[in-house]
Image (cartoon, helix red, strand yellow):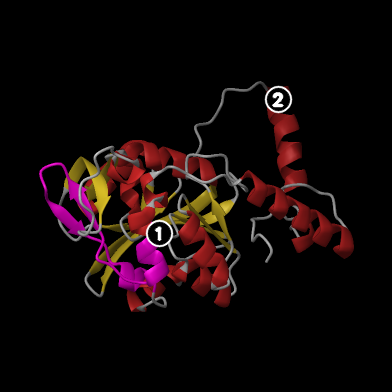
Amino acid sequence: MSAMLPPSSSSGTATAPQESRETAETLEADRRAEAPTAAPWGTDPYANALRNGRGPLFLRRSDGWLLPLEVERWCSDAGAADLSALHRCEGPVLDIGCGPGRLVAELTALGHRALGIDVSEAAVARTRRIGGSALLRSVFDPLPGEGRWGTLLLVDGNIGIGGDPAALLDRAADLLSTGGLLIAETSPLDIDERVQVRLDDGRRAPAAVPGPADRPFPWARIGTPALLRYAGACGWRPADQWSAEGRSFVALRRPRPRPAVRDRNTRTSSQSAESANSTPVISSQWER
């Protein structure tokens, strides 16, 4: 399996055998670096649900309120609502919080270069098993292809990652190319909620000594109006919004970089560099 990375701006080329060897070496280094995680999503309730392909699995708030997680849908093939988002994707796609990999696998089948990232070893393993490319990473970790992804996906509630939508939008802007697209699924409710939650399968008795699965972590639930407010404050431009099968989606364009104040000589040098880097990129120039 090869990593499906966005093109780099390098002007160098490589022979096919050299490219294959270096790509394999890079992937092997990535896998050696993927140490087991103690994050809640890497613990038994979530891992077991993915391995079994079904719940029950919930996010439990401190007051006992439960949000059911749709494990069966996540472990199925991409549905009509998923496809409504995937058909809007442009260029290489990064699926943030890819889960068991249905979207990465479908994007690959549609001919996109696609990569999933997740903090769960079980999720990454399943994504790879069904034919997708995935890395064991958080969105806030260093990632391949930063600043060159054409589309980012934040679906299945993943706009809530980290419990701070504004910080997540800032990170997304770092990852996208100029004019890149962020497709986010929002709550069908008009809500803007930041909470502490933990994973709960409804079967485990409270542990005498709390482990990673028992520790609360920050999460957010936001509807379309709230996401548009956060996006507007961060400079994102609305591109589209729609609903499918009872699910709500928003597409946003990456904010334009703030223009820097430069003298004429610096501007001329920069323009020359940009012209050199605008040469069409072929597959042998992918980041390895």
Measuring from the top left, give residue 226's x and y in whole percent.
22, 46
SS under mark 2: helix
Q: Is residue 62 above or below residue 95?
A: above
The residue lying at 42 percent from left, 67 percent from top is 51
| Magenta-drawn stretch contains 46 | no
Q: Which residue is mark 2?
A: 266
Nearest the viewer among 268 and 284 is 284
Q: Is residue 67 left or right of residue 184?
A: left
Q: Callout 1, which amino acid?
A: Ala
Picture quadrant where residue 245 is located: bottom left
Q: Is residue 4 above or below residue 265?
A: below
List the single residue furthest toward the front. Answer: 208
The residue lying at 31 percent from left, 62 percent from top is 249
SS under mark 1: helix
How many numbered callouts? 2
Nearest the viewer among 105 and 208 is 208
User: CA–CA distance between discs 1 and 2?
Assistant: 52 Å
Which is closer to the viewer, label 1 or label 2? Answer: 1
Q: Which residues are magenta?
A: 47-75
Measuring from the top left, give residue 122's x and y in whole percent.
47, 59
Of the residues under marks 1 and 2, which one precedes in the sequence?
Answer: 1
Q: Callout 2, which amino acid?
A: Thr
The residue lying at 56 percent from left, 77 percent from top is 109
Measuring from the top left, give residue 241's x and y in whole percent.
30, 62
Q: Which residue is mark 1?
A: 47
Residue 232 visible in the displayed image = no
Residue 101 visible in the displayed image = yes
**Disc 1: CA contacts within 10 A as few (<14), some (14-19) or many (>=20):** some
Nearest the viewer among 211 and 29 is 211
Q: Is residue 240 left or right of residue 287?
A: left
Picture quadrant where residue 170 is located: top left
**Disc 2: CA contacts within 10 A as few (<14), some (14-19) or many (>=20):** few
